[in-house]
Amino acid sequence: MDVDEFWDLIERSGRETDTREARVAWLVDELSQRPVEEIIDYDIWWTTTRDRGCTIDLYAAYWFVFQKGSLNGFEYFVNWLVGLGRDTFEAVADCPDRLIELPQVLHLLKPKDLYAKRRPRNPERMSEDRPEFESLAYVASDAYEQVTGKDPTGLSEAVHARRASGGFPLIPALGSVPHGEQWDFDDEQELARRLPRIARYRDQR
């Protein structure tokens, strides 16, 4: 499996299903019909793709746009970003400031009208809209377990044996933090320099 096939699976899963649960099941089913080597390939591309999004500037963009700072939440946010497809992911990974221009993000940030606030909120719909997608990370391990009947640890070992590694999970105590030069998020000038679109959005909010 090459990178184009990896992205084809990610994007087809979004087109073929209506919910996140169904999307994960679709991907697991697709991978379960393939040789173990392809499951390993998929996980390697997943790992290297997410690692590309594990940067301090993208973490800052997540922090300022969604007003969240959890490192676990950031990991699940990067999963969600991958789930939006190759073009979207690569555009934001290359320039995190573009996050504020995504239609999917603008929809989430749009003020709700007074009537909408009074209506009962649908927990399922809220879950589907949330810019985090934790379970997308478990696709390869679930497929590996189904095909081999073995613990997914074997998948992790196979991935590492091929020198694929990623930044997640982030564990500050062990020195694991987003890639890139660390900077003070309270520094207004640095924010404006690194993320000018997001800085303007924050000032107007």
Image: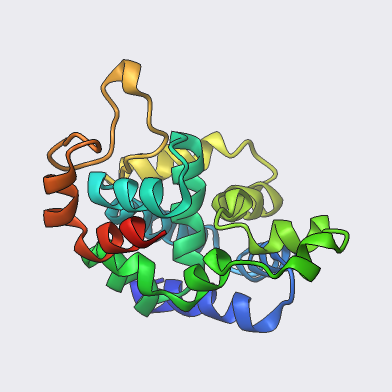
Nearer to me, 2 or 46: 46
Identify the residue at image location x=71%, y=56%: 127
Q: Quadrant of residue 63?
A: top left
- Residue 142 image position (x, y, % from top left): 65, 50
The location of residue 43, given as percent across then percent down, is 45, 55
Name the residue located 67 percent from the left edge and 54 percent from the top edge. 147
Count of marks, rendered view: 0
Image-based side of 205 in relation to 150, left or right: left
x, y percent for residue 91: 29, 73
Q: Quadrant of the N terminus?
A: bottom left
Image: 187 above or below 5: above
Q: Nearer the viewer, residue 38 or 105?
A: 105
Compared to residue 88, the image places residue 38 above or below, namely above
For the view shown, which residue lies furthest in the top direction? 173
The residue shown at (17%, 35%) is 182
Residue 2 visible to an observer of this rendering = no
Q: Nearer the viewer, residue 127 or 151?
A: 127
Q: Residue furthest right?
A: 120
Work out whether 68 lies above or below 80: above
Percent position of residue 172, x then y: 33, 22
Q: Describe the colour scheme in one phrase.
A: rainbow
Who's the residue at 57% across and 81% down the image?
A: 12
Taking 115 as reference, is 103 left or right? Answer: left
Figure quadrant of the C terminus? bottom left
Asked if residue 59 shows in the view, the reply is yes
